[in-house]
Amino acid sequence: MAVERTLSIIKPDGVERNLIGKVVARFEEEGLAPVAMRMVHLSKKEAEGFYAVHAERPFFDSLVQFMTRSPVVVMVLEGDDAIARNREIMGATNPEEADEGTLRALYASGIEENTVHGSDSPENAAKEIKYFFSDVQVFSRA
Ligand code: CMP
């Protein structure tokens, strides 16, 4: 098992409902340690840039509107197999398909307002971490 880093976002619906503590506690309990963290109110341009791979999808404009509605918490999680583990802990994108006990099954209200984001591959994790944090802003627990 390799120690990895992944980008996690607590989305506006999570921050608005005061779920920051619950989400971070869950990651810590599951062995994923935050090694960088900040709150940011994304501009339209920042949200569009982050989700650029979805630019042609029908939900893109609505997604950007949602992600810029209020502040989000962006963080880097570090731990064994962090990328896959984070995705297991989050559950499926659509909360109706998410396994019981996953963050999205517990907290998400729909496929868009799904409370958390997590990188889906090592390539995207590296890209997404860079989007929000410089090397000196990320610490190491490993
Ligand atoms: P996330 O894992 O952050 O990646 C893309 C986001 O687009 C997704 O979570 C949802 O918030 C949002 N989204 C809205 N509609 C859809 C859809 N039909 N399929 C996938 N993602 C969607």
Image (tube, rainbow, N blue to C red):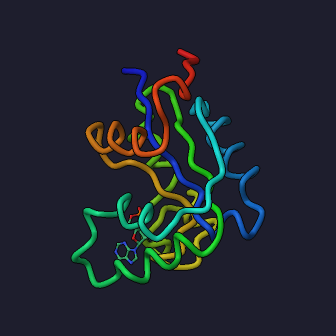
Q: Residue furthest top?
A: 142
Q: Say if 138 sits above or below 37 in the image.
A: above
Residue shown at 67% from the left, 36% from the top? 29
Residue shown at 32% from the left, 42% from the top? 127
Q: Say if 133 sits above or below 43 in the image.
A: above
Q: Position of residue 46 (x, y in %)?
A: 44, 61
Tell how many labels.
0
Residue shown at 26% from the left, 72% from the top? 55
Q: Residue furthest left?
A: 56
- Ligand 1 shows up in the quarter that is bottom left
Rendered-image quadrant of the N terminus: top left
> Which quadrant of the view contains residue 6?
top left
Residue shown at 73% from the left, 59% from the top? 19
Q: Position of residue 95 (x, y in %)?
A: 50, 72
Q: Say if 106 sits above or below 39 in the image.
A: below
Left or right position of 119 against 55: right
